[in-house]
Image (cartoon, coloured by chain):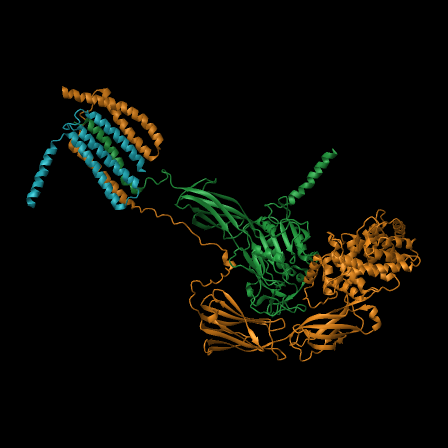
């Protein structure tokens, strides 16, 4: 249930026409171009003989002349398949089907060889598919070689064994081992039975044909229906394999049905609306995107076009939108499903009523005129009372030749939604700022809504803004459009929408700012005024920027709601940021070099002064030890001190502390030793002097 | 009164000068050394006042070398001065050895800090 | 021998499965699960699916209420992307539900959602989770009386032709889409505070979202360009979501149809739907606009190996390689606005990286004279591109005691003083000992 409901919704999406109307378009040129796109041979041939047949049959049905030429490569495959001894009946069937279209040159001996094989296959067949392929191949050979003497040996027996697989509800099983019944199998079985009947040497028993016809009627009891009048078959068992959807099931049944009714004498009382419903189902799919679906659709429609039960005729409208202003005529087409001409008939407009008032008809019982050049039926003149709007038109097709009622089926009434559009006159448009209490007009401007306006008004919260205009239909009556908005947009992009109400022809809106202050979030400033008036039937729907109004509103109180945040422009949301480079701390101001050098000189002055002072004091080296050993020690001592000081200078220049300390320890030990010697010598010398 | 104070200052100065002449020359050498160090320090301070204390470590190092060595020289003077009763038992060579050692350590530190 | 051959064949036959599976080196999705309401959609939208298949995607079609569907098995995701073409599904079959779809996106996988009139609450809920809000009125459609597509069969102006496309070469390709895009469905709004959502196709200023068959009694909640027809969301983990309000937009019928916008005299033979949706699908499946950054390298100027620490006022070089996935291979990404931040609590240095046009971006700058633990941060976010967020920590130390400047001319007097003191001391030692 859910699946069919879902399927229904999808079908509606695929058709995309609103619910009230249900128009089905017959096959058109868009189908033909889609077919050429869909069936594209690769390197001059299709992938398999089955696909080749599907493509060629589709091109043949649609009457496409500029089809790709695959005969050379394919004929080779066909003859190989037919001559090969290892071909199964299915391969032969596919090859023969392709051959029936391509008409390759096949030797008669090849056919002879196949016939005996197929006859054996028929006798030994146990499953439905075995019967189908072998009998189908025999039937194709009979057509292609026009051998009148090709017959099935035991046609009645075969008929019975196939019939034995049928179920009570009209479905068939695939084989006696398989208990599952399938609707697709029913179609296959009917096709096979039709083949048996056509290949039978003598008349098949009429009662058996009658039983099969009963089965067909039972099968049609299980047909399912969409709300828009389309009928379809679906498999009961939910099969994961996608090609068992409603399309392939329905097409299989249609093939079987049309094949059987072609060969069977006697009439089948199938209700015509079900045949028409099946045609609507196939047409309602539109243009399938899958090649197998496309083939199934076109093949089924071809069989429906020329079947012996009833041929559906489709009523379609090239356009459901008619312009009153441009004085367009409503046109209706009646065709067969493949788009061919219908027999002579009349299209009557039973009644037409507005979608808003379903009971009153504006038109009743009008016959449409026929244009033989364009093969359309058109409504030449609408009565003057008919105005713009949305209507439901109810059509009925009446065949001229009442005998043909058995051959063709047209359905009962077709409801179509028509939009009568026109140019709606907008006039007397004016905008005004009114004072609240008295209603006196402070400023008033006339507007030309169809053209440019640039009104600038100003108002405060104690005043009102009043906008009014008039809408008149082409016939002069009042018109209420679906969309009549007044939009105020603040500088900060906060928007407010108001509906413009009407009384008859006059539309007006009064914005009382005193009551709207809170709705406007207390935002004062410039508000752009925009008026949008539109309707499905209004040909001149408009969006008019009227101008702006400077509103002066009081300050927002504490608890007032904040205006909603507005969107940030996405293009400015991302973007490189400004570059930052670090400002380093300014280095200390250095003095000029000359100043440093000057002070360096100054520093050396005290040193020079020291030296001069020493000389003035009369320093001498009288106390220097005279004997060699103490003298050496003395010299070594001072050399040692000098060495240490030099080491310090080196340390300052390039050495590190560790090497310095290492060297210093050596020098220090040396210095201590030497110093001790010299100083003890000096000490003893001076004590000797003191005592002596 | 001002004239008498200036006269007294001059008399004081004269007596100071004559007393100073009597000091032994070794002490005078030490005094001269101290003066030299102090003047160097003063010039460095003046330089710092002019240009700012940018390489502060060098400034400290320079000033400390002067001041440190001046202090050590004053210590030496106190210890070597024969008239100081406190250091009667300290041999002047010993004091000198201390002076040299401390100075060497001082200069090591100065060189490290000079930058 | 036979057994050995058998094992070899089995192993070799398993290798392709390993190669095909999703890997971060190849960001484009490969396996896509498509959930449909009805298998008729597979046929009626075959042009869109064929364009995906021709680019190498493996599509798996399942009904939305199929009880065997699941996004993951034993903790591993079976698909790289999900396409929801099931606007009327009330409940998913199998193990799929709103939470599992949210997890799917959170783990970095992409999603396309197509709603339509009569979209179920489930689809609305999924869209709200993704960041867009459909009109609450269930029967509302987007109507535009001045921007509709001129049509003989759709007279109620719900079939609109929109050309308000986002201006982004990375989302919509570099070729300009000339023809307007046909749309028939419901509109949604985007929360202005949400910085991850972008309106790719917006409605015109005169449009509004309402039920075409009943009169308006109060102003509609969605009007004007605030109505978004197709939006994209790029999550922070770079998963991409497309939300479209019309399933028929993807259909063969709309792809093949010509379009003429009301009020314009230009009639286009083919609508912009196929171009627009193909380019958008390339973006959403990461065939465009997916960046990766490799080989972040930094070193001192003149050296080549990466130090573990910098010193203040060092000159350093930083380089990174950025590539963009072109659908089949990684191509160098060329732009001129990638920026590097040297960041500690706030960016101290922000520089634009220069490129050698082959994907290498580099710059050099001086380390600030503030020490601490810094980060090399590259935060790159551009419209339609995945975001790059690279961050590498690096400490910065102050000068060592022996890295300061020495031998300054300003300090010559001090040097002179120290040396003169040393010399003076030496002379003094001599004089003091031996002078009488």
Find residue B28 and report its horizontal and vertical position in percent.
16, 32
Task: Please give the name of the residue rendered at 67% of the width and 60% of the height, measured from the top-left corner.
Answer: C251
| Relative side of A474 to A120, left or right | left
- Chain C drawn colour: green
Point out residue A379 in the picture as x, y percentages from the top left corner.
72, 76
Q: Is residue A495 visible?
A: yes
Marker count (numbered): 0
- Between A585 and C231, which is closer to the camera in this rendering? C231
Q: Is residue C311 above or below residue A160?
A: above
Q: Colour of chain A?
A: orange
Camera-nearest residue between A388 and A3: A3
Can residue A92 be seen in the rendering of this structure? no
Q: Is residue C71 left or right of residue B61?
A: right
Colour of chain B in the rendered structure image: cyan
Residue A378: image quadrant is: bottom right
x, y percentage for residue A678? 23, 23
Q: Position of residue A372 (x, y in %)?
A: 77, 74
Q: Is residue A284 above or below residue A544?
A: above
Q: Which quarter of the rendering shows the N terminus of chain A? A: bottom right
Residue A605 shown left or right of residue A216 in the figure:
left
Q: Quadrant of the C terminus of chain A?
A: top left
When asked about the image quadrant of residue C175, the answer is: bottom right
In the foreground, A611 or B79: B79
- Is residue A378 left or right of C333 when viewed as pictured? right
């Amino acid at each position: 249930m859910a699946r069919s409901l879902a399927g229904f919704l999808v079908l509606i999406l695929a058709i995309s026409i609103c619910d009230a109307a249900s128009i089905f378009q017959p096959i058109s040129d868009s189908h033909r171009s889609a077919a050429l796109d869909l069936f594209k041979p690769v390197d001059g041939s299709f992938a398999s003989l089955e696909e080749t047949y599907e493509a060629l049959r589709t091109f043949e049905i649609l009457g496409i002349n500029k089809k790709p030429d695959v005969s050379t490569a394919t004929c080779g495959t066909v003859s190989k398949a037919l001559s090969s001894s290892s071909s199964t009946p299915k391969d032969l069937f596919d090859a023969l089907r392709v051959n029936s279209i391509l008409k390759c040159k096949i030797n008669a001996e090849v056919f002879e060889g196949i016939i005996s094989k197929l006859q054996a296959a028929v006798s030994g067949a146990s499953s439905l598919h075995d019967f189908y392929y072998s009998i189908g191949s025999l039937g194709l050979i009979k057509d292609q070689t026009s051998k009148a003497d090709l017959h099935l040996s035991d046609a009645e027996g075969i008929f019975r064994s196939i019939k034995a697989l049928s179920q009570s509800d009209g479905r068939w099983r695939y084989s006696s081992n398989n208990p599952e019944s399938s609707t697709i199998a029913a179609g296959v079985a009917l096709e096979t039975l039709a083949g048996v009947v056509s290949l039978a040497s003598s008349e098949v028993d009429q009662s058996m044909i009658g039983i099969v016809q009963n089965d067909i009627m039972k099968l049609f009891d299980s047909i399912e229906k969409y709300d828009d009048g389309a009928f379809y078959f679906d498999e009961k068992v939910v099969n994961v394999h996608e090609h068992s959807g409603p399309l392939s099931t329905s097409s299989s049944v249609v093939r079987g049905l049309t094949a059987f009714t072609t060969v069977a004498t006697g009439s089948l009382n199938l209700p015509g609306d079900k045949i028409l419903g099946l045609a609507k189902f196939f047409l309602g799919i539109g243009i399938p995107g899958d090649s197998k679906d496309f083939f199934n659709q076109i093949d089924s429609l071809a069989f429906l076009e020329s079947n012996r039960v009833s041929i559906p005729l489709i009523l379609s409208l090239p356009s459901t939108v008619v312009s009153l202003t441009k004085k367009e005529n409503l046109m209706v087409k009646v065709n067969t499903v493949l788009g061919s001409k219908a027999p002579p008939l009349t299209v009557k407009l039973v009644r037409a009523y507005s979608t808003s008032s379903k009971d009153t008809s504006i038109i009743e019982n009008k016959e449409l005129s026929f244009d033989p050049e364009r093969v359309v039926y058109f409504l030449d003149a609408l009565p003057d009372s008919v105005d713009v709007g949305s209507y439901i038109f109810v059509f009925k097709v009446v065949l001229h030749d009442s005998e043909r009622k058995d051959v063709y089926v047209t359905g009962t009434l077709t409801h179509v939604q028509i939009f009568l559009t026109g140019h709606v006159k907008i006039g007397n448009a004016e905008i005004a700022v009114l004072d609240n209490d008295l209603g006196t007009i402070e400023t008033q401007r006339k507007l030309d809504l169809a053209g440019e306006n640039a009104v600038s008004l100003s108002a405060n919260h104690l005043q009102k803004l009043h906008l009014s205009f008039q809408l008149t239909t082409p016939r002069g009556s009042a018109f209420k459009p679906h969309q009549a908005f007044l939009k105020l947009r603040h500088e900060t992009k906060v928007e407010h929408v108001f509906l413009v109400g009407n009384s008859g022809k006059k539309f007006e809106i009064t914005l009382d700012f005193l009551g709207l202050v809170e709705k406007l979030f207390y935002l004062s400033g410039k508000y752009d005024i925009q008026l949008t008036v539109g309707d499905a039937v209004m040909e001149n729907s408009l969006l008019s920027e009227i101008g702006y109004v400077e509103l002066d509103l009081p300050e927002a109180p504490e608890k007032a709601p904040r205006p909603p945040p507005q969107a940030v422009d996405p293009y400015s949301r991302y973007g490189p940021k400004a570059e930052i480079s670090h400002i380093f701390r300014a280095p200390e101001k250095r003095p000029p070099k000359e100043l440093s050098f000057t002070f360096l000189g100054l520093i050396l002055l005290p040193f020079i002064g020291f030296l001069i002072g020493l000389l003035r004091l009369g320093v001498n080296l009288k106390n220097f030890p005279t004997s060699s050993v103490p003298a050496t020690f003395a010299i070594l001592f001072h050399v040692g001190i000098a060495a240490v000081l030099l080491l310090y200078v080196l340390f300052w220049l390039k050495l590190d502390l560790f090497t310095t300390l290492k060297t210093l320890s050596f020098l220090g030990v040396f210095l201590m030793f030497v110093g001790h010697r010299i100083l003890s010598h000096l000490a003893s010398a001076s004590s000797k002097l003191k005592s002596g | 009164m001002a004239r008498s104070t200036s006269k007294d200052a001059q008399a004081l100065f004269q007596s100071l000068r004559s007393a100073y002449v009597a000091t032994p020359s070794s002490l005078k050498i030490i005094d001269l050394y101290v003066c030299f160090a102090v003047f160097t320090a003063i010039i460095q301070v003046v330089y710092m006042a002019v240009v700012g204390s940018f390489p502060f470590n060098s400034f400290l190092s320079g000033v400390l070398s002067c001041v440190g060595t001046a202090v050590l020289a004053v210590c030496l003077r106190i210890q070597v001065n024969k008239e100081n009763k406190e250091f009667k038992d300290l041999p002047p060579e010993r004091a000198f050895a201390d002076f040299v050692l401390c100075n060497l350590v001082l200069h090591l530190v100065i060189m490290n800090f000079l930058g | 021998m036979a057994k050995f051959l058998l094992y070899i064949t089995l192993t070799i036959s398993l290798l392709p499965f390993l190669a095909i599976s999703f890997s971060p080196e190849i960001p484009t999705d490969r396996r896509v699960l498509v959930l449909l309401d009805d298998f008729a959609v597979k046929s009626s939208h075959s042009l869109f699916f064929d364009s995906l298949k021709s680019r190498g995607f493996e599509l798996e079609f399942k009904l939305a209420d199929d009880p065997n569907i699941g996004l993951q098995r034993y903790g591993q995701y079976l698909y790289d992307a999900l396409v929801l073409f099931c606007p009327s599904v009330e409940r998913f079959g199998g193990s799929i539900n709103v939470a599992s779809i949210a997890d799917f996106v959170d783990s970095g996988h992409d999603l396309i959602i197509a709603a339509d009139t009569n979209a179920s609450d489930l689809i609305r809920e999924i869209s709200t989770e993704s960041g867009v809000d459909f009109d609450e009125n269930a029967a509302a459609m987007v109507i535009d009386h001045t921007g509709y597509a001129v049509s003989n069969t759709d007279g109620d102006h719900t079939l609109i032709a929109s050309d308000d496309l986002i201006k982004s070469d990375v989302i919509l390709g570099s070729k300009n889409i000339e023809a307007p895009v046909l749309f028939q469905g419901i509109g949604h709004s985007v929360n202005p505070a949400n910085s991850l959502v972008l309106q790719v196709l917006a409605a015109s200023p005169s449009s509004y979202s309402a039920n075409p068959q009943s009169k308006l009694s109060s102003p509609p909640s969605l009007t004007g360009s605030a109505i978004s027809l197709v939006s994209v969301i790029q999550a922070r983990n770079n998963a991409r979501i497309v939300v479209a309000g019309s399933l028929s937009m993807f259909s063969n019928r709309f792809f093949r149809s010509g379009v003429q916008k009301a009020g314009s005299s230009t009639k286009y033979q083919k609508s912009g739907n196929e171009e627009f949706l193909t380019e958008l699908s390339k973006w959403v499946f990461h065939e465009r606009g997916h960046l990766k950054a490799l080989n972040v390298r930094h070193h001192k100027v003149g050296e080549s190996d990466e130090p573990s620490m910098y010193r203040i006022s060092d000159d350093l070089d930083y380089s990174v390689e950025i590539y963009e996935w072109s659908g089949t291979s990684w191509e160098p990404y060329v732009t001129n606005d990638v920026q590097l931040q040297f960041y500690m609590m706030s960016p101290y240095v922000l520089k634009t990286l220069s490129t050698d046009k082959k994907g290498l971006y580099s710059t050099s700058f001086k380390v600030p004279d503030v020490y601490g633990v810094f980060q090399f941060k590259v935060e790159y976010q551009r419209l339609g591109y995945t975001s790059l967020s690279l961050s590498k920590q690096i400490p910065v130390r102050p000068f060592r005691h022996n890295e300061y400047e020495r031998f300054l001319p300003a300090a010559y007097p001090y040097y002179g003083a120290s040396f003169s003191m040393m010399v003076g001391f030496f002379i003094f030692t001599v004089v003091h000992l031996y002078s009488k």
